[in-house]
Amino acid sequence: MRTSFLGAVALASTIACGAAPPTPRPATPSAATGPRVEMPSGAVYTVEIARTPEETAQGLMYRESLPERHGMIFTFTDGGAHRFWMKNTMIPLDMIWMDASGKVLFVSADTPPCVSDPCPNYGPETPAPLVLEIAGGLAKKEGIRVGSTLKLVETR
């Protein structure tokens, strides 16, 4: 009798729990606020901004992954050409050089991590005040190519 009673209680609990409405999940953080970049595909990426020389030198070094739709933007005010290397970078990256309006000037797609010195440099020989780094392969997926325009929001 005790076994039947416990079985009935377990069954009733299972049915009651199964019928309960789902617990609302917290909203997934969106890229609706803070620094972000809208891609030609319409996807919005949250970006970190490398503002100091130290942040610029560090970039995405030592990171084993990037969150989905996440990247880093580098801003330069000196009017020069800025070439990047992949030393101490653990993952392939797409690097996108842009003018001040977000027009794409050069793309280094699926740029591999540097595995031995000397590390090659990537980028155009021409000035570009903005560089965006995202996970390798995403530039193509998001429709980024030379001549396309990315919308930069709160990145200055």
Image (cartoon, grey):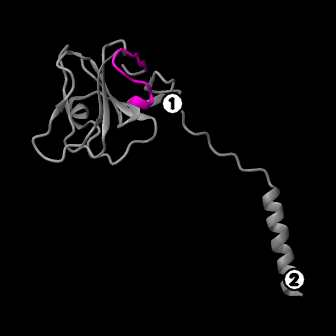
- Magenta residues: mostly which secondary structure? loop
Q: Is residue 86 left or right of residue 132?
A: left
Element class at badge 1: loop
Q: Which residue is mark 2?
A: 4
Disc 2 packing (10 Å; few <14; some 14–19; many ≥20): few
Height in image: 29 above or below 52? below
- For the C terminus, the image quarter is top left
Q: Quadrant of residue 57?
A: top left
Any part of residue 47 in sight: no
Q: Is residue 28 left or right of residue 45?
A: right
Give, as a three-letter code, the residue at label 1: Ala
Q: Which residue is mark 1?
A: 31
Q: Which mark is residue 43?
A: none
Q: What residue is shown at x 21% (from left), y 39% (from top)?
A: 86
**Residue 149 highlighted magenta (yes or no):** yes
In this picture, which residue range is highlighted in magenta?
Answer: 140-152
